[in-house]
Amino acid sequence: MSLRKALHRLRRRRATQPVHGDSTQALKGLLRGRVRPVLFDVGAHFGETHAGFARNFPDARIYCFEPFPDSFARLAENVADRADSRAFNIGFSDRPGAQEFHANRASPTNSLLELDSRAPETWEMPGLLGERKVNCRFETIDAFMEAQGIARIDLLKLDVQGAEYRVLAGAERALGEGRIDAIYMEIITGPTYVEQWPLERYLAYLHERGFELFGFFNLAYRSDHYLMQLDALFRRAGG
């Protein structure tokens, strides 16, 4: 092949392949052909992710979970008009019952975990501080699936501000029995919460449970190009 033809082919490839992965297209690919897939939106906040799920997967059954009462009130309003969406004023963890929930100045940062003293520096936000603790209700995914008669989860989305490993621990039976097909989760890489897991621990944990990494998306960098967080998509190996 001549150099001219090779360069032309390379330019065409660059024009048709995105430089950055598209999480929506990746999720559509993994769920393609599934009839009425079950989507869990854990850490739903006001329903921001739900809106995208409802638009891109119109026949999906979407379960939204938000433990913080103020955020749940807005979530419930935002999903009320969709017949196949349900909102629950609970969070998921490794054990059921009331637990202390850290309500911070910015509600999207609320978490089971306490903010790390380094968080303001990590995120270049001096005002990123905790304000109060509230008792919120938590369940395990395993118990919820059994109580609701849910046989499998096609997509488990997790955005619980550093406590994702606690949610996964409460889904050990479903994970072990192969009843969760894909996991789309936020992973915070910069010091933000006390006891948060590093990226490599999640990779090893899910690999041990039969999942493979499909891709990284929405990488967030600080002004000095330090990686603060990303979204990771895992699928069951061989799926």
Image (cartoon, grey):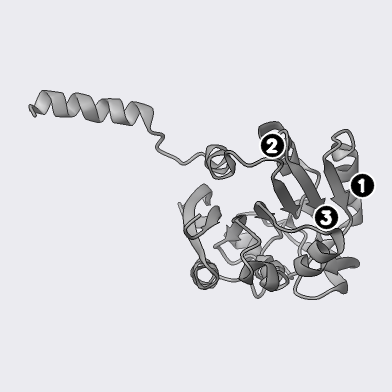
Label 2: how many residues lie within 10 Å, few (<14), some (14-19) or many (20+)? few
Q: How far apart are the two marked residues, 2 and 3, measured between alpha carbons?
A: 17 Å
Residue at image point 24% right, 30% down: 10
Task: Kindly identify the amino acid type of the residue bearing the numbered disc 1.
Answer: Ala
**Where is residue 34 drawn, in percent x and y?**
63, 42
**Where is residue 225 drawn, in percent x and y?**
45, 52
Task: Kindly identify the amino acid type of the residue bearing the numbered disc 3.
Answer: Glu
66 or 127: which is nearer to us? 66
Task: Kindly identify the amino acid type of the residue bearing the numbered disc 2.
Answer: Gly
Question: Is disc 3 in contact with disc 1, using a CB cutoff of under 8 Å?
Answer: no
Is 143 located above or below residue 32 in the figure?
A: below
Residue 105 appears left or right of 126: right
Residue to which mark 3 is pinned: 66
Label 1: how many residues lie within 10 Å, few (<14), some (14-19) or many (20+)? some
Is 192 located above or below residue 77 in the figure?
A: below
Residue 46 got which mark?
A: none
Q: In the figure, residue 190 lies in which quadrant? A: bottom right
Q: Mark 2 vs mark 3: which is more N-terminal?
A: 2
Q: Quadrant of the N terminus?
A: top left
Q: Mark 1 vs mark 2: which is more N-terminal?
A: 2
**Residue 223 shows in this picture:** no
Residue at image point 70% right, 39% down: 53
Residue 73 got which mark?
A: 1
Label 3: how many residues lie within 10 Å, few (<14), some (14-19) or many (20+)? many
Residue at image point 67% right, 65% down: 164
**Residue 169 shows in this picture:** yes
Residue at image point 54% right, 62% down: 189
**Where is residue 234 drawn, in percent x and y?**
54, 57
Residue to which mark 2 is pinned: 52
